[in-house]
Image (cartoon, helix red, strand yellow):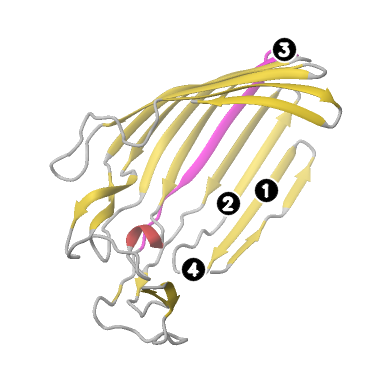
Amino acid sequence: NQTIIITPIYSIYMYTFDFLLRVGNNQTNKTKAYAVCTNKIEDSAYTLSKALKPETRTTHVNQINPIRETSRGPRPNPDFKRPPDVVDAGTFAETIRAGGTAAELSLNRRINEKLSAFVGYDRVYRYPVFDERAAYQGLALAEAVSPVEAEAGDSFELGFKYLDAHQELFVTGFFLRMENEIFFDPTVTGSVSGVSGLNVNLGEVRRYGFDLYYGLDFENWGGSIQLAHVDATMRTGIGPDETGRGRQLPLVAPWVATSQIWWEPLADLRLRVIHRY
């Protein structure tokens, strides 16, 4: 796999221009370019970025695995060659083209010296990578090629920040609506005998919730608490029969919390007690 990332940054007066060029050579994706322009004027700021349309091409070749399982564990396969021989069974060549737009817009307003507010919008787009589309190199899926489609959505955020010499408070509320969210379903069966599990599209999924953080920092002691809540509901379910419609999305914890207290008895020693839920 080869990835080249170029990130020149150019600043003039009140504007900063960032340009990201990323080229991938791993048969998974080509992200053409990202451009970001940021303007900061005293107590206001805005950021606008746009990702150009990405393109994906997928080609799968069933070839001999370089590693084989033995009674002594994984061992190099003596039949493996470089370049490897192609196994005709299960080999296919396919070109898949997909395009979409991702964008971000955020506004920040400083209300006074300690308090600021912000609002943000994101247009989300992600096409499935090679691993999500096809089974290869011994990774078994229910289908050799998954018909999974690109996922897209809209995200909205509204929040406040409070900062002073010894404490900080962040409060953010969010709403995220996704279409065709990619999800691995371990119960799916298909044309591959004896194997279950396949990446599928969930249809419409809505998430809403909030993030809360409060921290104290004094000369030699402090603490913090971070609390997050998210409600993730499948609005349409999976497939034509809309399996799971109206249910909570699996593996998404509705509540996550982390709290800690710390004490520095010496300049080079900090003791902490952390609790995670």
Q: Report x, y in % for residue 204.
A: 29, 37
Q: Is residue 141 magenta?
A: no
Q: Label 4, label 3: how many angstroms apart (C-alpha)? A: 49 Å
CB contact under 8 Å: marks 2 and 1: yes
Q: Residue 117: which quarter of the image? A: top right
Q: Residue at x 39, y 67 (%)?
A: 57
Residues 70 and 272: in front is 70
Disc with the residue nearer the chain's start (3 vs 1): 1
Disc with the residue nearer the chain's start (4 vs 2): 4
Residue placed under numbered mark 1 in the picture? 18
* Label 4: few (<14), some (14–19) or many (≥20) C-alpha neighbours in 10 Å: few
Q: What SS does tag 1 mark?
A: strand
Q: Residue at x 65, y 52 (%)?
A: 19
Q: What SS does tag 3 mark?
A: loop
Residues 250 and 56: in front is 250
CB contact under 8 Å: marks 4 and 3: no
- Looking at the rendered structure, the kind of residue marked 1 is Asp
Would residue 228 be seen by someone viewing this image from the given angle?
Answer: yes
Disc with the residue nearer the chain's start (4 vs 3): 4
